[in-house]
């Protein structure tokens, strides 16, 4: 996610919540610069969603939809046109404390249910998510901007974590350890850690939640979700479906609004035993420090700086398809998006030309329009950051091959961009771009590619394209990354572990490993058994 101090300062200069009290309270700074009333198109989408019962705007505490106690609200905007699509509760410390109490009380019951019982409820939730994938997809496009097809794809992907953990929760096995003394029996039990706080970002408003909540609920934990203030509507709709699926009141709570106040309350509470976070490296570090006071378990999924290495011996078509998929998915706004495209000198000209031609054909526009594959960026701050990286690279000798500026559609649209002659020292190669910009670096040898790829504090995902089996193994092993795609640009799946080396995070999400993050290991020693 966004990591630079430059980005931070841009965000602070341009980002705004519209905080409203009932009357005319306006301590406001605007999350998006182009905030305006709803257009008729947005109105009809919102009206449809309201009829579906999935357009929730209050927080969820102890099974009850709850306003902020002081009545404050925060606006949610459609990034494609600035429309204000909703005003949602803007919560803080008091609401968070109540959500923690609800989760704490609910834990004693939920954790004692049989795994089959929990599994059935999770399975119901999965079914409801799939049944409502169109509406959930529309909510995602409305508040996050990604093309509707991609948004519906996120629902399917997000729901898969609930289905997977509904099953995997049945396999939380312990151990019997052969004893060193004849009258002793040694056991290992795995038990739920307790109340979990899940703090999530805006780029996958559903999937980043289900990836945490699925394993947490499956093994008996209860959860407080703190979705991004930019995209709370999807989280609220998914939670409404969780209630309908038989997940009891208090097991899943949602608070949103003032991130610092909510975060601090979650960190300070001794009842919260686990913090799981996806977001910027800067915020992740703060949470890690804050969690130390009460020694909570911590999982962090932070920023990446993914290298995508195309060797001379790659299949050009495969490399092109994979690079486009990893770079331009979600308009470049994922932490596993290729951030640096390293191309070996023998294939450099051919590949960059083919890449430029392909990127030229990517249709940009409102995510609700047919055929659009590139939506807007999340907000004005994001556009300014992307543009500043491009300008910085150009000023240091990089060559714009395509795009390189704001899109004529205005708002937060940016032209899909390819830039050649990038050096690994440039800002664009040091920081996460989080936008539709493909920076291409030329390299000579495999050793050099590995050195450039690893020359970063991040270590989330890396991609290599080669037809050599030996090189595939060699380079995969040499890359200091938690995830490596070989001849493949889309690697995320609920059945495989997702997470990073170095400053990209701690812990893994998805797969059997994802459950461990929510479990305590208990050793039981039975003596005098002789
Ligand atoms: P990005 O830079 O991509 O917006 P952030 O790390 O700022 O990523 O945001 C990810 C999540 O962290 C959001 O839900 C946001 O509200 C939350 N967040 C931001 N600052 C804090 C904080 N100080 N304490 C707790 N949560 C925070």
Image (spheres, rainbow, N blue to C red):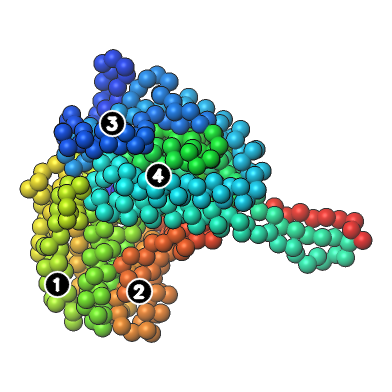
Dot placed on the residue nearer the N-terminal end, 3 or 2: 3
Q: Residues within 10 Å of mark 2 (few under 14, many from 20)?
A: many
Query: How many marks overall?
Result: 4
**Earlier-in-chain disc, 2 versus 4:** 4
| Cα gap from disc 1 to disc 2, whole angstroms | 20 Å
Percent x, y of residue 244: 48, 38
Whole-number angstrom distance, CA of label 3 to CA of label 4: 19 Å
**What is the spatial separation of the Cα atoms under label 4 and label 1, in whole angstroms?**
36 Å
Name the residue carrying label 3. 86
Mark 3 or mark 2, which is nearer to you? Answer: 3
Visible in this render: residue 102? yes
Q: Are marks 3 and 1 in contact (CB under 8 Å)?
A: no
Which residue is under mark 2? 486
Q: Please tell me which of labels 3 and 1 falls first in the chain.
A: 3
Q: Position of residue 28 (x, y in %)?
A: 25, 25
Which residue is the site of mark 4? 200
Q: In the image, is the residue at mark 4 within 8 Å of ligand 1 by its beta carbon?
A: yes
């Amino acid at each position: 996610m966004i990591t630079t101090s430059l980005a931070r300062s841009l965000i602070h200069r341009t980002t705004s919540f519209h905080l409203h009290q009932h009357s005319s309270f306006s301590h406001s700074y605007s999350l998006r610069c182009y905030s305006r009333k709803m257009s008729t198109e947005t109105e009809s989408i919102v009206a449809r969603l309201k009829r579906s019962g999935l357009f929730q705007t209050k927080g969820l505490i102890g099974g009850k939809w709850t306003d902020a106690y002081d009545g404050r609200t925060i606006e949610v905007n459609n990034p494609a046109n600035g429309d204000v699509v909703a005003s949602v509760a803007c919560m803080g410390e008091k609401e968070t404390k109540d959500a923690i109490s609800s989760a704490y009380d609910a834990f004693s019951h939920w954790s004692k249910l049989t795994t089959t019982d929990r599994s059935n409820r999770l399975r119901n939730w999965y079914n409801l998510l799939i049944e409502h994938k169109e509406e959930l997809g529309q909510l995602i496009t409305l508040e996050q901007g990604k093309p509707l097809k991609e948004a519906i794809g996120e629902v399917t992907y997000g729901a898969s974590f609930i289905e997977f953990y509904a099953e995997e929760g049945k396999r939380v096995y312990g151990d019997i350890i052969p004893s060193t003394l004849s009258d002793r029996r040694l056991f290992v039990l795995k038990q739920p850690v307790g109340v979990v706080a899940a703090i999530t970002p805006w780029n996958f408003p559903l999937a980043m939640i289900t990836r945490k909540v699925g394993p947490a609920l499956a093994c008996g934990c209860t959860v407080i979700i703190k979705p991004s203030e930019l995209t709370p509507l999807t989280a609220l709709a998914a939670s409404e479906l969780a209630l309908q699926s038989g997940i009891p009141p208090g097991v899943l709570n949602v608070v949103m609004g003032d991130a610092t106040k909510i975060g601090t309350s979650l960190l300070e509470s001794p009842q919260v035993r686990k913090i799981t976070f996806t977001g910027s490296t800067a915020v992740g570090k703060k949470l890690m420090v804050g969690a130390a006071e009460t020694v909570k378990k911590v999982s962090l999924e932070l920023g990446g700086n993914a290298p995508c290495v195309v060797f001379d011996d790659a299949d050009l078509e495969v490399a092109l398809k994979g690079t486009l998929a990893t770079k331009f998915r979600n308009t470049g706004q994922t932490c596993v998006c290729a951030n640096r495209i390293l191309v070996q000198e023998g294939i450099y000209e051919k590949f960059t030309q083919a890449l430029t031609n392909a990127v030229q054909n990517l249709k940009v526009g409102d995510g609700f329009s047919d055929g659009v594959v590139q939506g807007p960026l999340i907000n004005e701050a994001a556009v300014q950051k992307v543009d500043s990286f491009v300008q910085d690279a150009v000023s240091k000798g990089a060559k714009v091959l395509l795009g390189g500026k704001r899109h004529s559609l205005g708002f937060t649209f940016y032209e899909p961009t390819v830039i050649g002659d990038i050096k690994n020292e440039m800002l664009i190669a040091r920081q996460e771009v989080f936008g539709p910009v493909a920076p291409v670096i030329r390299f000579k040898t495999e050793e050099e590619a590995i050195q450039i790829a690893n020359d970063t504090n991040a270590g989330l995902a890396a991609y290599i394209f080669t037809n050599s089996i030996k090189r595939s193994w060699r380079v995969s092993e040499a890359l200091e990354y938690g995830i490596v795609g070989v001849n493949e640009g889309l690697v995320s799946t609920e059945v495989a572990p997702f997470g990073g080396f170095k400053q990209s995070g701690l812990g893994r999400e998805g797969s059997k490993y994802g459950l461990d993050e929510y479990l305590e290991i208990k050793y039981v020693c039975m003596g005098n058994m002789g």
